[in-house]
């Protein structure tokens, strides 16, 4: 789904973070609006350009795991992606390449969505309302990322964001940004269809799921229960848990009924190490795979984002999700008929013995030509199990333990685990633990710990009152002329 603006990504990002401005959607040689947005095809190309900015989903996956108790940074050395190691150790500050990339990628997505709204009256055609609904969903998604990383952020809608405007704009209170997120998503829900002909296009179910998530993150539990409960009860898209969790994350089982909101990838090259945001493939997969591995099933990679022993031991006995989610490499090798012929290397950035078995390179799933960068594995931003667990949490927090247990036990039944019978706070803790087990390795753990107030007790080095938010990149504060204050503690 990468048909437009690929050239501008290189101009925008260079080597990901080398550009000296927050964002620039109007570089030299840009096609201006007078010569664009004149046909249905122009609008469709433009919305694909907005979709394109979801491709750096690897940032959310890495940071959401590495900042938590689920994973360490790994890699070749502590100087290899130093920002990830700082995040792991809770020593990150205003100079952090990965965090700057998060801010710039999401604001670029917002700018592209706003460019469509700026020109929405230029031409009418059947289906324009769907494109505008998609643009609202995507803008909400990008703002949702920003407020959860950085808190208060400048809120600008319906027009392009120029460098001067964004640097002059004050940081909008997080609550107001959330109001816009909710508004955009409710508008999207009203227009988007339950089912689409083109794989990867957004749906009503995806918008309802993200709206429910946004409400849950604000602790609007009754509202979240209403939205998520309606999604589950109505379910005209036919969402369902995939029967076999052990094979759910194989490439052959993508775009199944469990997928609610999925970011699509292909095995084509696209960018390279100098422009990871330009990739067509899922960069997380190659980076998270086994360093210099030779052997069956898997393929070599860069040993990033390594699961911890604590995560591995958190699974109950008999839970098939443990080995399906976390690869115990030495146990895997020992079980092979030729273990002495299997080799791998340990990176200097840390080693746990475990790898993310959900998003890992397998020999029969390699893209071309550089398979470190061309994994065709889609990223499931929200899947049906997540919807059920969010609903369970929202129902429990709003006083409906019975419905909470119903949704929770649907997830446990899929993997033949005993039903939960607890109530009150014990049930709440069971739901949160189930989220860790079911969704491990998917980039949600840190944000779950923060929003539920459990981060300080679970994350080594976490300082309450500081680490709930990440620091605003210092270079962006400088570019804003001091208009933005740094987040507390940084």
Image (spheres, rainbow, N blue to C red):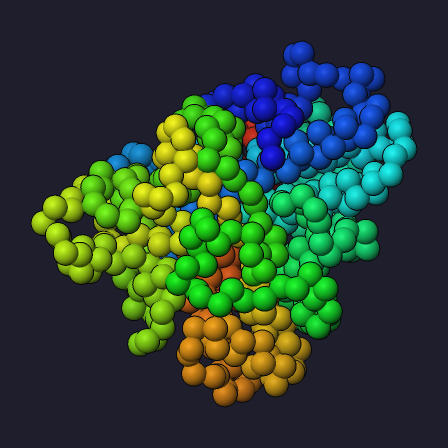
Is 336 positioned to the left or the right of 188 in the image? Answer: left
In the image, 29 versus 234, the foreground residue is 234
Q: Give the residue drawn at x 67%, y 11%.
A: 29
List x then y, in percent, for residue 136: 75, 44
Write down the quadrant of residue 166 in the picture: top right
Q: Is residue 273 above or below residue 94?
A: above
Residue 68 makes an appearance in the image: no
Residue 8 sits in quarter: top right
Q: Which x, y percent locates residue 346? A: 19, 43
Residue 6 image offset from top left, x and y in percent: 59, 24
Q: So how many labels did they put on this image?
A: 0
Height in image: 174 above or below 155? below
| Residue situated furthest top in the rendering | 29
Residue visible at 88% across and 27% down in the picture: 122
| Residue 43 location, quadrant | top right
In which quadrant is the N terminus drawn? top right
Q: From the viewer's perspective, is 85 left or right of 51?
A: left
Residue 57: tell me if it is visible: yes
Q: Looking at the image, which is closer to me, 436 or 381?
A: 381
Q: Residue at x 72, y 64 (%)?
A: 236
Position of residue 205 measured from the top left corner of the image (x, y, whole percent):
69, 58
Point out the residue furthest to the left here.
Answer: 340
Tell me the residue at 34%/66% (across/down): 322
């Amino acid at each position: 789904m990468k048909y437009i603006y690929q050239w501008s990504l290189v101009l925008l990002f260079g080597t990901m973070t080398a550009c000296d401005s927050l964002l620039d959607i109007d570089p030299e040689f840009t096609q201006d609006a007078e010569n664009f947005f004149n046909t249905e095809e122009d609008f469709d190309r433009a919305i694909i350009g907005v979709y394109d900015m979801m491709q750096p989903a690897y940032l959310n996956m890495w940071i959401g795991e590495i900042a938590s108790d689920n994973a360490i940074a790994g890699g070749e050395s502590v100087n290899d992606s130093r920002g990830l190691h700082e995040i792991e150790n809770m020593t990150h500050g205003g100079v952090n390449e990965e965090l700057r990339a998060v801010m710039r990628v999401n604001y670029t997505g917002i700018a592209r969505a706003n460019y469509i709204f700026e020109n929405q009256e230029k031409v009418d055609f059947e289906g324009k309302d769907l494109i505008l609904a998609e643009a609202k969903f995507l803008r909400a998604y990008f703002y949702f990322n920003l407020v959860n990383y950085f808190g208060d952020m400048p809120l600008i809608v319906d027009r392009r964001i120029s460098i001067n405007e964004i640097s002059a704009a004050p940081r909008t209170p997080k609550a107001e940004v959330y109001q816009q997120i909710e508004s955009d998503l409710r508008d999207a829900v009203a227009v988007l269809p339950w089912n689409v002909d083109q794989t990867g296009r957004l749906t009503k179910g995806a918008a309802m799921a993200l709206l429910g998530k946004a409400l849950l993150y604000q602790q609007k539990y009754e509202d979240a229960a209403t939205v998520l409960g309606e999604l589950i009860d109505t379910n005209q898209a036919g969402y369902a848990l995939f029967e076999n969790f052990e094979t759910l994350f194989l490439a052959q089982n993508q775009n199944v009924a469990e997928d609610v909101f999925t970011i699509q990838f292909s095995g084509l090259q696209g960018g390279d190490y100098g422009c990871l945001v330009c990739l067509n493939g899922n960069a997380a997969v190659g980076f998270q795979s086994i360093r210099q591995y030779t052997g069956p099933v898997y393929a070599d990679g860069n040993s990033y984002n390594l699961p911890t022993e604590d995560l591995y031991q958190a699974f109950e006995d008999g839970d098939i999700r443990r080995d399906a989610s976390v690869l115990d490499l030495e146990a895997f090798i020992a079980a092979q008929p030729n273990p002495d012929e299997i080799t791998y290397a340990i990176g200097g950035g840390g080693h746990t013995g475990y790898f993310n078995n959900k998003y890992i390179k397998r020999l029969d799933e390699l893209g071309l030509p550089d398979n470190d960068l061309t994994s065709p594995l889609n990223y499931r931003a929200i899947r049906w199990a997540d919807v059920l667990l969010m609903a369970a949490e929202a129902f429990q927090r709003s006083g409906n333990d019975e419905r909470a247990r119903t949704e929770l036990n649907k997830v446990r039944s899929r993997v033949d685990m005993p039903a939960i019978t607890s109530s009150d706070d014990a049930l709440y803790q069971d739901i949160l633990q189930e989220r860790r087990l079911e969704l491990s390795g998917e980039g949600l753990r840190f944000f779950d710990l923060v929003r539920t107030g459990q981060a300080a007790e679970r994350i080594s080095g976490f300082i309450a009152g500081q680490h709930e938010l990440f620091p605003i990149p210092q270079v962006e504060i400088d570019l804003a002329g001091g208009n933005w204050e740094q987040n507390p503690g940084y």
